Image: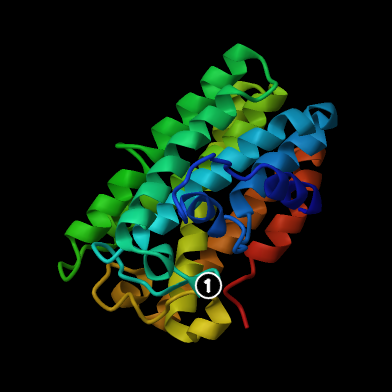
């Protein structure tokens, strides 16, 4: 984490412009904190299998975090969630204005792919990485999930539809982060698929836990706007708090079994993150 944070702080977007806040707007939400869950998944796999490639993977990990941050900036906009707080700080449209927030998100989205293209990795590897991020973050991935989420506010979905929503909106970027790490170190396609499928269910667990946090924690505890899901198709709204906790517990136990079937290097790589997140909903 420390190595990534140092790299991140030294490689924020830099733009030589007379615009008074544009450059600050590009970096402020990245440096505001966050769990760094997605880049840590990617880097943990690289470090476990091919530590010599770690420095080459850092731009890719930063790209994933930039892409994720763009999605949060847009998710918080007045036209979507209209949130005031993110990562313990004012959202960008509150700090500056809506246009600045919108354009900062656009820039981070585009620049994420530039970071991968310029990474010191083989060209064929970079093409695969760009493809994975685009497939899972674009029209048939995260953006689709966000579109479903916004369109069906105040229109209840069934549990399978809610899972489709959150697989796209949240889980695919988590799953692709695992697969991108596997691509960098050259793990075979069977392991890549297994990691991706594991990441999809891990992302679902992550979302259920997030819905529980929204229901049970204050804004100060969560570091973001909470109690804002009343019109949303969240797991808590559909299943209730108690059943959502049970669902999270069942999914966590299944993920733990699958995790224990991974080889020793994968278990070593992911163990710290699994300990932290498989039990995040408890207590």
Who's the residue at 74% across and 34% down the image?
46
Q: Residue at the far left: name it.
A: 155
Helix, strand or loop under label 1: strand
* Residue 204 appears in the picture as rendered: yes
Q: How is the image coloured?
A: rainbow
Who's the residue at 62% across and 63% down the image?
33
* Residue 262 appears in the picture as rendered: no
Which residue in the structure is indicated by mark 1?
89
Image coordinates of residue 100 in percent, x first then y, are: 37, 55
Q: How many marks?
A: 1
Who's the residue at 36% across and 69% down the image?
235
Q: Is residue 218 above or below residue 268?
A: below
Q: Is residue 4 left or right of residue 146?
A: right
Image coordinates of residue 282 in percent, x first then y, are: 61, 78
Q: Residue at the far front: name it.
A: 18
Image coordinates of residue 272 in percent, x first then y, are: 76, 57
80 or 42, which is in the foreground? 80
Image coordinates of residue 12 in percent, x first then y, are: 62, 45
Q: Residues within 10 Å of mark 1 (few under 14, many from 20)?
A: some
């Amino acid at each position: 984490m420390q190595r990534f944070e140092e790299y991140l702080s030294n490689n924020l977007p830099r733009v030589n412009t007379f615009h008074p806040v544009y450059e600050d707007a590009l970096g402020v939400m990245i440096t505001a904190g966050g769990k760094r869950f997605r880049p840590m998944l990617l880097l943990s796999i690289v470090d476990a299998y091919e530590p010599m490639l770690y420095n080459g993977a850092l731009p890719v990990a930063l790209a994933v975090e930039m892409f994720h941050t763009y999605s949060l900036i847009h998710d918080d906009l007045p036209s979507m969630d209209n949130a005031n707080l993110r990562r313990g700080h004012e959202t960008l449209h509150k700090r500056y204005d809506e246009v600045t927030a919108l354009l900062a998100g656009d820039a981070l989205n585009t620049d994420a792919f530039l970071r991968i293209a310029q990474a010191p990795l083989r060209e064929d590897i970079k093409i695969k990485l760009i493809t994975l991020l685009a497939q899972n973050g674009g029209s048939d991935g995260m953006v689709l999930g966000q579109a479903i989420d916004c369109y069906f506010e105040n229109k209840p979905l069934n549990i399978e539809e809610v899972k489709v929503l959150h697989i796209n909106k949240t889980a695919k970027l988590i799953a692709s982060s695992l697969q991108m790490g596997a691509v960098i170190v050259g793990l075979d396609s069977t392991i890549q698929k297994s990691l991706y499928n594991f990441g999809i269910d891990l992302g679902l667990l992550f979302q259920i836990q997030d819905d529980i946090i929204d229901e049970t924690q204050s804004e100060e505890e969560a570091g973001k706007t909470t109690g804002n899901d009343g019109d949303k198709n969240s797991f808590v709204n559909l299943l209730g708090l108690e059943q959502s906790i049970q669902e999270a517990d069942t999914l966590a136990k299944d993920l733990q079994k699958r995790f224990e079937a991974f080889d020793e290097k994968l278990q070593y790589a992911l163990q710290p993150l699994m300990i932290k997140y498989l039990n995040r909903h408890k207590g």
